[in-house]
Amino acid sequence: MKNNESTSDFEIVSKRLIPADPERVLCAFSEQAHLEKWWGPKGYVNTFHQFDFSPGGEWRFDMRSPDGEVFENECVFEEIGPERIVVRHLAPVHRFLATISLLEKDGATELEWRMVFENEQQYQDAMEYVPQCNEETIDRLEAELANIPGDGSDERDLFLIRIFDAPAEKVYEAWTNPVLIKQWFAPHPMALPVAELDVRPGGSSYMVMRGPDGNDMPLHGVYLEVIPNKRLVSTDAYKTAWEPSEKPFLTIDLTFEEFNGRTRYTARTRHWSMEDRVAHEEMGFHQGWNQCADQLADLVEKSN
């Protein structure tokens, strides 16, 4: 669920049901290492100068927009609790009081984000862009939750979560249709000129990533589990016809969940050892997989 509404003359309210328990969502707010990664609209980058997550604590940071403009922010936390965060925004542009509620609902978190502005002019100005910015910010919050372990997590795993404005069958098809997967499954400036997919349990996959220098990286795998529009599990432990690979590296576990008219997409890479996990991070897992997820979003959302 996502919703924008106003209950007073100068108030903007955003709501969403987050597919995670309140403790994990609170962690995303309370720990600087997480908050600085997701706070703000899509494409914004944060630099924190002071972050004291306690009543009366100061929060000062810069936000850099995609076009390079820097916004200096000054805030003070007025109330901190497991179900409620109140923060006063002092600068720049607008002055407002934000109240963020985190309530448990059926194993998820009902997030309510209320912003009360000081006067009508600030409210009217904010209404032109704040509701959309809030939605993008909450999208980033949901994505960052992938980096906060929950039940069933393993320290050898790397994963990301995205919410796409497209049905699950369309996202699933983008993974299983050779024509479509070539359009997004390679971080720029790489390309994917070859994609041979036999999508069935025991079926093999063969893809080739090509770098701008012309060098090719072959990718072999076998599908372990195929549940159309719901789950796709593959591993590089085997090649064609269950031929063992020389050096298994990872198993990819993808889930596609219907979530209030959209798709909650989780991509989890499960490694054979901590050394492999660390190596994958150093190879650029977060940058590469997130860029591919952006490209996947562009593909599935543009025709939705």
Image: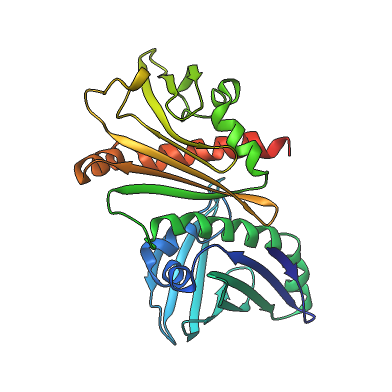
Q: Quadrant of the N terminus?
A: bottom right
- Residue 169 at x, y = what percent? 65, 39
Q: Is residue 189 left or right of residue 67?
A: left
Instruction: Out of 136 and 88, give the one closest to the viewer.
Output: 136
Q: How many numbered marks appear?
A: 0
Q: Quadrant of residue 67?
A: top right
- Residue 231 at x, y = what percent? 51, 42
- Residue 70 at x, y = what percent? 52, 56
Q: Residue at x 64, y 66 (%)?
A: 16
Instruction: Out of 60 and 101, give the one closest to the viewer.
Output: 101
**Is 115 drawn above or below residue 209 in the view shown?**
below
Q: Is residue 46 visible?
A: no
**Is 143 drawn above or below residue 17 in the view shown?**
above
Q: Residue at x 50, y 76 (%)?
A: 75
Q: Is residue 280 left or right of residue 150?
A: left
Q: Residue at x 38, y 71 (%)?
A: 50
Q: Quadrant of the C terminus?
A: top right
Q: Residue at x 57, y 71 (%)?
A: 106
Q: Is residue 294 visible?
A: yes
Q: Is residue 154 left or right of residue 292?
A: left
Q: Quadrant of residue 24?
A: bottom left
* Colour theme: rainbow
